Image: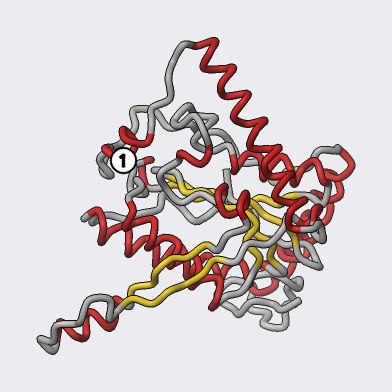
Amino acid sequence: MSRHLRFIPEGGALVEVTCRAIQGRLLLRPSPQLNEIILGVLGRAQRLYPLEIVAYVLASNHYHLVLRTETAKQLSDFMWYFNGNLAKELARETGWEDKVWSRRYQAILISEEEEAQVARLKYVLGNGVKENLVARAEEWPGVHCVTPLLTGGPVAGTWFDRTLEYTAWLRGKELAPGESASPETVHLSQLPCWAGLAPEVYRSRIADLVQEIEEAAAAAREESRIPPLGAKAILAQQPETRPKKIKKSPAPFCHALRKQVRKALWEAYGMFFAAYRVAAEKLKEGDWTAVFPPGSFPPRLPFVAV
């Protein structure tokens, strides 16, 4: 199945971004050092290519981000920096020499409906618990947004200047401890449908979602009699491990509760796609005056600003 054109409706949108490690390998297996690096890369990407980060979780072989972006270009720039630098750090930490990501990131539109937005936030918060890896969301030993969302505390990471380190190595210079490190901060935004809530009210709603997730998982464990894997076992896994089976299902075009909302998003995309296709055919025939729709990436041409 071919990929959809990169598309963000006029005025911006909330999206869920997912990306999986090659062959489902556990290249993102948590560790205190890797967690610090990941948050450093995420914070620096946000600082250099600003957009709103609502939620995030990095599992051992994939991740989810819930982001609010104004354009496809803004999202593309952010993801280019985040995925590219994270891949380098993962290869450095694990010794992996092949490509890191199985494919380009997948960005799925989330409608403006409160139910749809809350459902995707709840899904991200439940990662680690719903798979019976840990009993409580805050027990996940990797990078997870649950604690800062519950407490309102800062999200700090560290960026390591690998160019500085390499230059020093070439010159035979030994850097002082921490000389190549600089702090970065991830800034979290409220879910758009809950924007404007007092911070304590927002945290209370997050707590309610987490409680629902953990109670449902506890009931499932009671029925199955299977205990969670646990943080210790997760940390002991080898990054190069390849799962015997990877869960695969076609990604939806959008997350929307009501049929008419899904239809409206599909129609907006359909108009965008049709205009893009007409312009692409003209360009293919050598017509350089072809006009691509705003918010698109023409073949081998600059992004068309909105």
Q: Position of residue 196 (x, y in %)?
A: 82, 61
How packed mark 1 is, by other alpha carbons closer than 10 Å (few <14, some 14-19, many 20 or more), is some
Q: Residue furthest bottom?
A: 171
Q: Position of residue 24 (x, y in %)?
A: 38, 40
Give me the residue at 28% from left, 58% from top: 91
Of residues 11 and 132, the one drawn nearer to the viewer in this rendering:
132
Q: Is residue 188 above or below residue 249?
A: below
Q: Position of residue 284 (x, y in %)?
A: 62, 71
Q: Residue furthest left?
A: 172
Give me the residue at 34% from left, 28% from top: 244
Of residues 200 and 297, the one drawn nearer to the viewer in this rendering:
200
Q: Position of residue 217 (x, y in %)?
A: 57, 24
Give the residue at mark 1. Answer: 235
Q: Determine whether, in the image, residue 262 is placed left or right of residue 176.
A: right
Q: Determine whether, in the image, residue 13 is placed left or right of residue 104.
A: right
Question: SS class of the residue under badge 1?
Answer: helix
Q: Quadrant of the C terminus?
A: bottom right
Q: Is residue 93 above or below residue 292?
A: above
Give me the residue at 43% from left, 65% from top: 157
Of residues 167 and 184, the one drawn nearer to the viewer in this rendering:
184
Give me the residue at 57% from left, 47% from top: 146
Give the mark count.
1
Q: Is residue 111 above or below residue 183?
A: above
Identify the image quadrant of residue 120.
top right
Q: Quadrant of the N terminus?
A: top right
Identify the image quadrant of residue 116.
top right
The amino acid pointed to by label 1 is Leu
Colour convention:
secondary structure
